Amino acid sequence: MMKQIALYGKGGIGKSTTSANLSAALSLQGLDILQIGCDPKRDSTRMLMHGNFIPTVMDLVRVRGEAALTLSDIVYTGFNGVRCVEAGGPEPGVGCAGRGIIATFQLLEKFGALTGDVIVYDVLGDVVCGGFAMPMREGYAQDIYLVTSGELMSLYAANNICKAIKRLSSRTKSTCRLAGVICNAKNQPREEELVGEFARRVNSSLIQYIPRDRVVQLAELNRKTVLEYDPDSQQAARYRSLAARIMENTRFTIPTPLEIDDLESLALEFI
Amino acid sequence: MTSNPLPLNLSRSGGCTLTGALSVTTQVRDAITIIHGPKGCTHHNFSLLHATALDNDRVSLPDVISTGLSESDIIFGGEGALRQTLDAAALRNCSAIFVLSTCLVETIGDDVTAVCQGSHGIPVIPIPSAGFLGGTFQNGVNNALNAIAETAEPCAKGSCVNVIGEKNLEYEVEENYAEVSRLLGALGIPVNVRFLRDCSIRDISRLGAARLNILRDGEVRAVGEQLRYRFGTPFIPSFPVGFEGTIRFLEEVADCFGVNCAQAVYEEKSLQDEILAEFDDIAGTSVTFDPAGVSSDTFPVAREVAGHFDITIDRVSRTVPLQFSPPVGTNGIRHMLHRWRRAIHA
């Protein structure tokens, strides 16, 4: 059965790095992977594509028109056969990027593109509007992973996303659930404990602790995922562990978001 | 942030801000109105304006164009579609173009004003008219009137008045104007501009020439104040309402122009006496006012008129009809009394 997972979290927290390395690790398990970048910044799949920005669905629609597009125009094969799609969006400052995500999903449906063993949706920082909640809706990602560090603002964003998951999961036919928290650390003291406790308080669990490691930057400068650049590194092992845990995960919950005061006092406990 | 209240006003003059703005801009004979939004906004309003004109015995096809936004315009922004529509409209022979915004373009944040600033050789006037922002039909009317007034420059004053903010969608719009025009005629004062009903951009350029503005009613007070600020023109805040109100109207206008109104007042009082005699047959009866679809402003004058005929108002007698807005002038009361008589003798 096809697994669809989505990674959400604060902007700049490392969702795309995590997604790309996760997709690479999953593909190395022999799975057929599709990664969809749902951010107008379009850089989700870049490391899988060896540093290339692939044409986005929205750019293609804008330039060529929807009628002229085929599946092969929008899906690109990257590292180890991982198929990559970038939704893209309007030029910064105009139009409606959220509607662009909805239109992209409709197009992907039309083309029958949503196939494989695992689909990884890499979604922009915050669920700012209904459009960016699209990957959580019925028929798409059932398993939502929050990517966060131990910094308060990052936890705050993760907590907000819990609110969106809670709202969406309460709908009758909804199948989206919180599947876990990924700690992409800033290497603060007691960070793993803090994020672990946060995960517990929002009725979930810490799936993987990923410490800050220079190999991530080195891999990026070489336009590769860590799995490709240095497969023997500790960091690569962590991404493989993340991939394995995600495939084995059976704990899917309706989150219990915290009040801001509780979130702050939680962060204070782990100074 | 605004929240839209429930539409309590179900008359033709209730409803969308866009419709209000259109009820004004489509009265400019030599202008084109662009509605920046999906085509449905244009279709519905076109139908409403066309049907209303037919009701008022006019066959008119309002000159309205839609930018016809589609989903891709929403995602990538609708400014390009507006620019194209604007360029195409500017090639036609017109004196001005009005650009009205809709809910959709205000939601995605199209900068309509910036697009309108391009050079087209004629005035291109943006009028904010998205309904979901909580504005009323009347906000649309007022926004349009204020925006269009900007096309006129201050000029030397003459011995004339402007009529401001006629309700172009009301059934009695011409009848009401005729009554005001008759009263002004009795004082020898002509109307300069009907702002805005059936006129050209050139007509509107004379807006500053009037010595007095006569507002349709309190709903356009903000426009009256804007015109007073811009052209230094004082205003009378409403068309005349009620027997006494009509006499007062004559006195106020005469006072503003420094003319003697004794003869006009005498003749008007005679006309009012005639009416009292003419409808003698309904004196002393009992009636019920049906409040459905009637502005609260209408009841005071209905009660005043009933008082002149010793008509008792209760909740159980024959229901007499009231129009949405108060009757205008002495002849407006006569028309109302005709309707009452038909109901009472039915």
Image: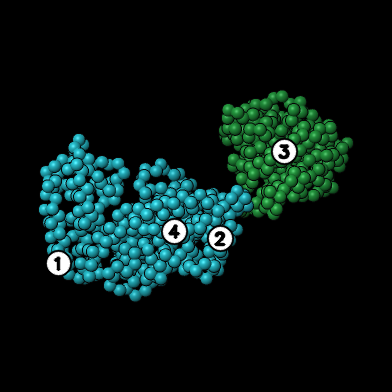
Query: What is chain B's hue in the picture?
Result: cyan
Can you see residue A44? no
Residue at the (34%, 56%) spot, across then down:
B57
Give the residue pinned by disc 4. B62
Q: Which residue was labeled with disc 3?
A: A112
Q: Residues within 10 Å of mark 3 (few under 14, many from 20)?
A: few
Label 2: chain letter = B
Cα–Cα gap, marks 1 and 3: 85 Å
Q: Which residue is mark 2?
A: B85
Does the CB distance between marks 2 and 3 fall below 8 Å? no
Point out the tag, 2 or 1, that comes first from the N-terminus.
Answer: 2
Q: Residue at x 84, y 47 (%)?
A: A222
Residue drawn 56% across the image and 50% down it: B108
**Percent x, y of residue A102:** 63, 42
Q: Residue furthest bottom?
A: B156
Question: What amino acid is labelled 4 in the image?
Answer: Pro
> Residue under circle 1?
B262
Give the chain letter at badge 1.
B
